[in-house]
Structure formats: C-alpha cells, structure tokens
Amino acid sequence: MAVRQIAVTPTSVTLKPDDTQELTVEFFPSNATNQRLTWSSSDEEVATVSSQGLVTAVKPGAATITAVSEDEGETAGCSVTVSLNDPVTVSGEVSGTWEKYTVVNVEGHLYIPAGKSLTIEEGVEVIVSTAGQDANDTRIEIIVRGNLYAQGTEEAPILISVPAGERTTANTFARLWGGIIGSETCEEILLDHVIVEYTGAVTTLSSPSVTGGLFKPAGGEGMVAFNTNNPSGKYVIRNSIFRNCGEDAIYVQGGSCIFVYNTFYAVGEAGGEAINVKAGCKVDAAFNLMYSANTNALKLSNSGADGGERFQAQINGYNNTVVNTGWRRDPSKPKGGSIWGEAGCLIHVYNNLMVNCMFGAKAPGFGVDATEGPDLESDIDYNFYASGTQESTVPQHIANGTITAYDGFKPNVQDVVYGANDKAGTAAGDNDPLFANFPFDTNPLLSYTYDASWDFHLEAGSPALSGAKTDFDPYFAATGITVNGTTYYSPEPASYFGAFGQK
C-alpha cells in the first residue's frame, strides 16, 4: 500500500549545543508497504540529523529537519532552534571548561591558579564588566598563573569584550578593561580564533598586575591586551584579532612564542605597538596584518636581559603586511613607524610589505655596535616599501618633512635600515603593491578605522609577488611549540612579500 502522508513528532524543538532529539514519523496509512525515509537538515552548521532521525544541535541558529518518504515523496518537518547555553557569572579563581556557545559574564578580576587550566571552547562570549573594582576605580584583569586554552574556530570565534552597548566608536580607546596577563608560573597559553578588544585600562596601585609585580612596578600605566612573564613558558596566538586597544596588543616579557595569521587594528591611543618583544623571548611573528598601530607593528627589544633566565630576545619577523603604522604617534616623540629594533636583540626581519607607514624599518646603530643597536648577527633586508600620494596635515609632520610615507622611506632618513634586496619606489605613488581591494593612494594616513571588506591579497602583476627571501629557518618551523598536547609550527617563509600573496 502506498504512502499517502507522513507526520514528524515533535514539529518544533529548542535545543542547546550538543543536545540531541530523536524524531519519530507516523505513516498514513499505518500499514504502508515502503516506510523508508531520507532525512536532511536545511543548515548542518546549526543542526544535523542521522539516517534514523536523531537530531544533534551544533550551534545557535535555526534549521528545518525534513523527512522525505521514499515511496511517494511525501514530506514532513521539524523546526529546530538552537540557543546559547545558559549564561554563567564568574569572578575570582576559575578553571575547568567554559562550554561552547556560552555567555560568560566576568564581574571581577579572574585568576587561573598555578597548576590548573581554563579551557574556553568555540563560540564563547566572555563579557567583561567595565565597572571599577575598588576605590581606585581599578578595572578588571585576567591573571593566568596556570594555563589558558582558548580554542575558537573561523565560524565561531571566541569573543573577549565588554557589554554590547559599550562597543561604540567613542569607546575605541576608552580602555574599558585591562587585559590577559601570564604570570611567572604560567606555562602555556593558546589563543586560536579569538577576538580581544577594548583593553588598555590604566593600572592603579591595587591592580593585580601591579600588586603581583607582573607588568609595571607602579600604577598609572596603560595595560596591554596580552602579556607574559615566564621565559620558560610556551605561547601561541594564531588566527586572532586584536582591536580597539588603548596600548600594545601583544607585549611579551618571556617565553617561546608563535604569533601568526593575526589581525591588528586600532592599536594604541598615544603610543603602542601590535607586537612588543622584550628579553627572555624567542619569537616567530609572521603572516600578520597590522593596520594603524600607533607607533610600530613590531617593536623588538632586549630590555630586561640579565644573561640568565632573561636571555637575549630573539625574533624572526617575516611576511607581515603592515599598513599606516606610526602616524598617530605624538610627532614630538617619534619612535619608529613600522618596525623598530633596539640594542642587543637578535632580529631577522624579512619579506614584510610595508605600505603608507611613517618610516621604514629603523634600528639605531644597526651593524655598528650591539650596545647601541641590535646584535651584529641581525639582518633587516628583503622588505617591500610602498607609499601612496596622500599627505599628512599635522603641522609637526610638515615641519619634520614627513608629509607622505615616502618621506620616511628614503635611504637617508635617520636610523632607517635599507637592505640590498629591499624593494622601494623612487617617489610617492609608485611601487603600488596592487592589493585586491584597498585604497592604496587615498586611505588617510592617520586613519585607524578598519574596513572588513578590504582584501590585502595581491593581484596578478603585483611587484610584491616575487623577490622575497625563502632560504632562512624560522625558530619553530621544524620543532614547533607544543601547547595542550598539540604541536603548532611556524609557517615557512613565502616567496612573496607580505602576509597574503594571490588568492
């Protein structure tokens, strides 16, 4: 007997991620001969369904599960709504797991105890209160004494932010909370597909980073978004976004580090770098996009070296795309403008695509004296410089003769290091790298407003597609860094300049 109609029970259901629901089907007539079915989901990113009608919730959203009769093609369905997990409120000591697609409301300083770990799963929203925590109006900080593993995905990144109503343009540099600080006992941190924003709160004498001796010896300093203090630690940040930071995004004072495939923009209010490295660190920083850092994309320093645990800072900075950095720095206190190398550090800076930055790579005393400049084994070469014709109207820039980016790229500019294999134009407006979608010749130099539609891949025929250096070994390309049982490797250098190449 042929199937005339089918009905699915229930017809609608609300689930949370990872919940399951078995659907049943009634056939009309009940004695139909062929009762075989085909099941499907309208959106398998929201909910999946097995061949037996078992629905599994994946992530928040809506989907329709449909059953189709093999006999006559009759259909019936169930509307599935997947909601967030129940919100939780935390303060003080935390460890364990924050389950995926959960809103975690942070109401006070957080501490991950030494010897313990906190795992944050995909789609979690960590909402940090902006309320002052004491009479000093101290803002919340996250202190990692143990381990932190924040593992998002491209489709469901982890967000560490402030309440939605405070995510405004006016609050871009409002310094609404402190940042993530790894202490001397912090062994491992992973940030993968994580968005960190609205950091940089000014410390007070009662800030945990101050009372713990982790960041600065006294209050009154702007906190950074991410900080480490353990030279024996292992830290990996990849596929993540740092934005709307009052000070530096990444400021590391110890550890083996891989910082790759990240995006930085609107970093630093009156100073600040995308990545700032001190003594006690061994770092590969590559394939990052750094737009409008206040001062530098990379500040490479050996500050704090003691010849022991705080060993010489060693950094490979390669294949980064650096745009518009340096222009927002107080022009009476210039310090770099793209990449800055300081005394004593060992640095290799290759294949970076630096566009419309205030200055080329700078390293005072480079190649002359390691007490004044970087280690004599350092190298800065094979970088690509391009300047549009747009001009700064800041009076001090005009007085200094740094009106266009080209003015700061010239070989005779003080402390700029030009390598024999660098590529640079001979005037403002030439050497266009031919981005797929970016206003190379019109984007305002002092702008920190990032347009998500920009595409920094290179078009066919771009002069930046060839000529980069490939015969060098990043520190962690072969050995990797193992964090939470997974080994992460630094990418090999690319034959093009910058982070993206062609699509």
Image (cartoon, helix red, strand yellow):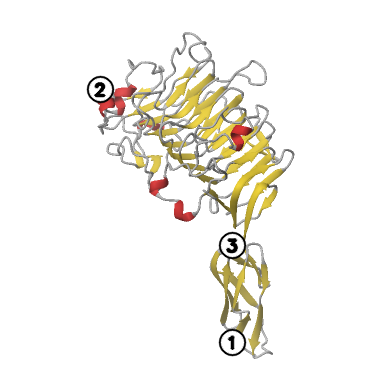
> Label 3 belongs to which residue?
84
At x 51%, y 29%, the residue is 276
Left or right: where 30 falls relative to 130: right
Where residue 273 appears, as percent x and y from the top left, is 46, 31
Helix, strand or loop for disc 3: loop
Q: Earlier in the sequence, mark 3 or mark 1?
A: 1
**Image label count:** 3
Where residue 389 appears, as percent x and y from the top left, is 25, 32
Indicate the quadrant containing the C terminus: top left, top right, bottom left or bottom right: top left
Examine the rendered structure and indicate whether residue 294 appears above or below residue 132.
above
At x 33%, y 37%, the residue is 434
The mark closer to the camera, 3 or 2, is 2
Quarter of the figure with residue 424: top left
Q: Residue pushed farthest top?
A: 368
Where residue 105 appears, as percent x and y from the top left, is 59, 54
Q: Amino acid at mark 2?
A: Ala
Q: Residue pushed farthest right?
A: 115
Where residue 407 appears, as percent x and y from the top left, is 29, 23
Report crowding for label 3: few under 14, some 14 to 19, many 20 or more residues within 10 A (C-alpha). some
Determine which of the numbered discs, if any, sits on residue 106 in the image: none
Q: Earlier in the sequence, mark 1 or mark 2?
A: 1
> Label 1 belongs to which residue?
5
Q: Earlier in the sequence, mark 3 or mark 2?
A: 3
User: Whole-Å distance between the Cαs marked 3 and 2?
Assistant: 56 Å
> Label 2 belongs to which residue?
399
User: Whole-Å distance between the Cαs marked 1 and 2?
Assistant: 82 Å
